[in-house]
Image (tube, rainbow, N blue to C red):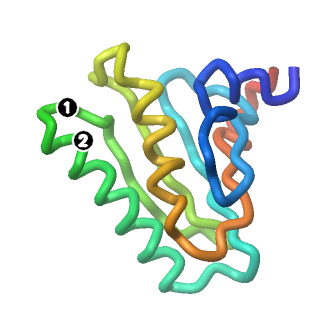
Amino acid sequence: MDFEFDAMLGIDKLTLNFEAHVVGFDGECFLYGVYFKDAVKEEDFVAVKDAVGSFASEVESKGLYPGYIDVTNVDDKVVIYLDLGNVEPENTDASICGILTSLNNVDGIKEVLINEESGIDF
């Protein structure tokens, strides 16, 4: 079943500058592990945080809720936490994919793995 969930969520249809895959699931929560080609620097973390913040602001300006989003710097990656609680069902895929698309302009990203440590592999 490798990467069948990419197709289900529309990730395989995105034009991205990096590899992105759903590795597992954890209910309505998504953890994006953002890996860079080189060691993560503070400016990489800030760039990811700014890109995701711009995405969230754009969605909210349309009167929609993108979900609860938090960005942290963890060891060898930047982690984006997305909780889709209270997101309208028809907007969930747009939030999941929107975060990935927002990262397209961040230099140096090698890959993004979603829910790689969920413990629920398919």
Classify mark 1: residues with Cα within 10 Å, few (<14), some (14-19) or many (20+): some
The residues tagged by marks 1 and 2 sit, at their Cα atoms, a distance apart of 6 Å
Give the label on residue 22, or none. none
Considering depth in this image, is 32 or 75 the residue closer to the camera? 32
Q: Going 50% across and 85% down the picture, which residue do you hit?
A: 42
Image coordinates for residue 3, horizontal then vertical, percent:
80, 29
Image coordinates for residue 11, horizontal then vertical, percent:
63, 34
Secondary element at tag 1: loop
Label pair 1/2, CB-CB below 8 angstroms: yes
Considering depth in this image, is 32 or 60 the residue closer to the camera? 60
- The amino acid type, in three-letter code, at marker 2 is Val
- The amino acid type, in three-letter code, at marker 1 is Leu
Q: Earlier in the sequence, mark 1 or mark 2?
A: 2
Classify mark 2: residues with Cα within 10 Å, few (<14), some (14-19) or many (20+): some
Q: Going 32% across and 41% down the picture, which residue do you hit?
A: 68
Q: Seen in the image, is 80 located left or right of residue 25?
A: left
Secondary element at tag 2: helix
Q: Going 67% across and 53% down the picture, which residue do you hit?
A: 112
Q: Is residue 69 above or below residue 52?
A: above
Considering depth in this image, is 38 or 58 the residue closer to the camera? 58
Q: Going 75% across and 75% down the picture, which residue do you hit?
A: 37
Image coordinates for residue 86, horizontal then vertical, percent:
27, 22
Give the label on residue 64, or none. 1
Q: Seen in the image, is 5 located left or right of residue 72?
A: right
Total marks drawn?
2
Give the label on residue 59, or none. 2
Image coordinates for residue 54, horizontal then vertical, percent:
29, 59
